[in-house]
């Protein structure tokens, strides 16, 4: 587990707490984040925590997936900042969670 947590902390914006969250979501390496949907990760994280988490977690997941999918020499330094991934139209965390659930989980309960 410690190896995974240290690896995740190489991702900009990911500290000990978020590294542990990624581990608890089932990821063991940065490469495991490739092709993941950050919105689904956000909802799964909210489920894991038992309540809707701050929307900044969604932005952090977007940044983490970008980091995992992009070769280091091709990474845009601006895209390595979680705030780069903020939605253009701001909504609160609960509204965003509900929007994602409706869009990505329709027909499931």
Image (tube, rainbow, N blue to C red):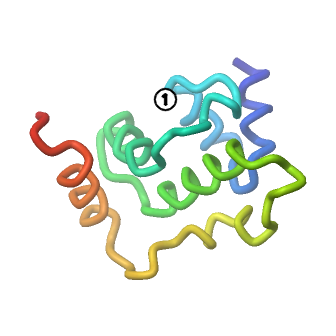
> Could you say whether the residue bearing mark 1 is in a helix, strand or loop?
loop
Look at 79% across and 22% down and name the residue there: 3
Residue found at x 47% / y 56%: 58
- 84 left or right of 15 in image: left
| Image position, residue 78 (x, y; %) | 75, 72
Judge whether 53 appears above or below 31 on screen. Answer: below
Horizontal relation, residue 47 to residue 79: left or right: left
Q: What is the quadrant of residue 35 in the picture?
A: top right
Q: Quadrant of the N terminus?
A: top right
Residue with the most extreme right position: 73
Q: Is residue 41 left or right of residue 68?
A: left
Residue 68 placement (x, y as % from top left): 70, 42
The residue most toward the top is: 1
Q: x and y percent of residue 33 in the render?
A: 60, 36
User: Does 85 sit above or below residue 9?
Assistant: below
Answer above or below: position of 83 versus 15.
below
Q: Residue 76, how many percent across, how many down? A: 79, 66
Callout 1 crowding tier (Cα within 10 Å): few <14, some 14–19, many ≥20: few
Where is mark 1, residue-wise?
25
Give the total number of marks visible in the rendering.
1
Name the image quarter holding the C terminus: top left
Compared to residue 93, the image places residue 1 above or below, namely above
**Which residue sits at x=74%, y=49%?**
70
Query: Which residue is at 81% across, 47% downward?
Result: 71
């Amino acid at each position: 587990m410690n190896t995974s947590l240290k690896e995740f902390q190489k991702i900009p914006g990911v500290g000990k707490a978020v590294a542990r969250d990624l581990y608890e979501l089932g990821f063991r390496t940065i490469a495991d984040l490739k092709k993941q949907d950050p919105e689904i990760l956000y909802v799964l994280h909210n489920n894991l925590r038992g309540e809707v988490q701050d929307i900044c977690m969604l932005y952090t997941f977007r940044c983490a997936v970008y980091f995992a999918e992009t070769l280091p020499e091709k990474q845009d330094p601006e895209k390595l900042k979680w705030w780069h991934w903020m939605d253009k139209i701001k909504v609160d965390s609960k509204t965003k969670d509900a929007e994602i659930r409706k869009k990505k989980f329709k027909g499931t309960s």
